[in-house]
Image (tube, grey):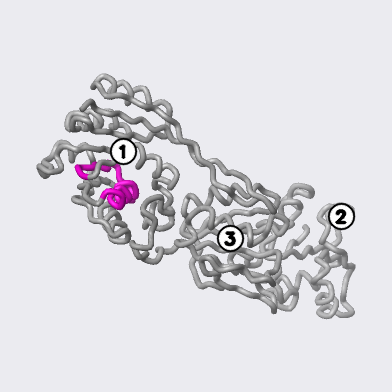
Amino acid sequence: MIDVIGTDAGAPASLPAPQQKLLRAATLIAAPQRLQAALRGWLGDALPDLISSDDPRALVGSLQSQPAERSVVVLASGDPLWFGLGRILCDRIGSERLRFHPAPTSLQLAFARIGRPWQDSDWVSLHGRDPEILASAMQKRPAALAVLTDPNQGGASTVQRMLRGSGLEASTELWLCENLGHADERVQQIAPGAPLPDDLHPLLIALLIAREPAAPDPHDLPLFGLDDGLYLQHSDHPGLMTKREVRIQLLADLALPECGVLWDLGAGTGSIGLEALRLRPQLQLLAVERRAGGAQLIQRNAQRLGVNPAAVLEADAIQVMNGTLPTELNHPDRVLLGGGGAQREHLLQEVLARLRSGGVVVIPLASVEALAGVRRLLENAGLAVRVQQLQAWRGQPLGDGTRLAPMNPTLIVTGTKPG
């Protein structure tokens, strides 16, 4: 067997007793150059054959040529099976000849340093990978995201630029963890908008921790097109909201009147209806969201934006249609039909029965299959129908340049009832 031992910065002296015993009994030790001086001092005259493990290909060749009776130990950083030598050794030598003894990973150390549980965390590695995977991971709004940076792709600068480009900087803590476990270890939080230190180690772990964004001053906010990160979101479904680019287009397609009634069905975080109120304060907004806690979330977002919906209901939209609405909200001038799912067509029929003359209904769709049924209902009801697809891209860092990362396309169906 070949024993593959994970180490921390204090190895070999800091290794547990069983692993120290394996080292002392070894006839061959493979270790990175940075550990070899410590090994020589620790083992003294008992030092066995010592080879470098810094070149994985050369290491595999050396290990394969060893007689079976030799006692071989390979030292690696952290957990050898987590972005370490373990994968290469398993592929080239075979797991049946290997016995692993992991130490804490850099990921474990990073979360330990900031004192946060990490069982709910996600992680991505940018080593030799397209940075787009980080953009995709951030859009899911995980509670915690660890990023193994690649200095050849900008390191911490790439992470910060992508965070800013996502519109989530205000709702995310950025921690940089350098040289974990070493004497010159440094862990620091970077404030939103702040520059990165000039003396960062090129290889580090970045932690992105979701937080509730600070309450803004509504008077300082743009009239519409707010950053996604300004909204409070459902903790169990972070990222499940209409993105800024789509939100702007839907507000335009609604052709908001100065006053009247706006229904936002399947309101989610309330983003579209609430921004509509910032544009047209005299509108009466009915927001309906069936997800548990939806009404409270929308009301909190309304307070953050300084607007006041006429009614926010936590209920299924079909049930709302079958119930009794206040007289002043019973007939909408504008409807955003963002929910419905399998009942979308049934819900649309209820909406069309109540839509006022000259009214507009806007329906964003994620799939082409839903288009035919929705369009048929609108046209059969005598509405003028417009169909469009919105495709947006967000700039993301790529080395010293910028690449355009595509967002999910959205079909938008708009129906206008004759006046």
Q: Secondary structure at mark 2?
A: helix
- Residue 298, given in percent of the width and then of the height, sits at 29, 54
Q: Identify the mark nearer the N-term, 3 or 1.
A: 3
- Label 2 environment density (alpha carbons within 10 Å; few <14, some 14–19, many ≥20): few
- Residue 153, given in percent of the width and then of the height, sits at 69, 55
Q: Identify the mark nearer the N-term, 2 or 3.
A: 2
What residue sits right under mark 2 in the picture? 58
The segment highlighted magenta reads 259-280
- In the rendered structure, does residue 26 fall within the stretch colored magenta? no
CA distance separating discs 2 and 3:
37 Å
The numbered mark at residue 160 is 3
Task: Out of 230 and 83, give the one closest to the viewer.
Answer: 230
Please indicate whether residue 55 sits to the left or right of residue 271 in the image: right
The numbered mark at residue 155 is none
Q: Secondary structure at mark 3?
A: helix
- Residue 264, given in percent of the width and then of the height, sits at 27, 43
Q: The residue under label 3 is which amino acid type?
A: Gln
Please indicate whether residue 112 sits to the left or right of residue 359 in the image: right
Q: Secondary structure at mark 1?
A: loop
CA distance separating discs 1 and 2:
67 Å
Q: The residue under label 2 is which amino acid type?
A: Ala
Is residue 235 something one can see in this rendering? no
What residue sits right under mark 1 in the picture? 255
In the rendered view, tell whether residue 117 sits above or below residue 407: below
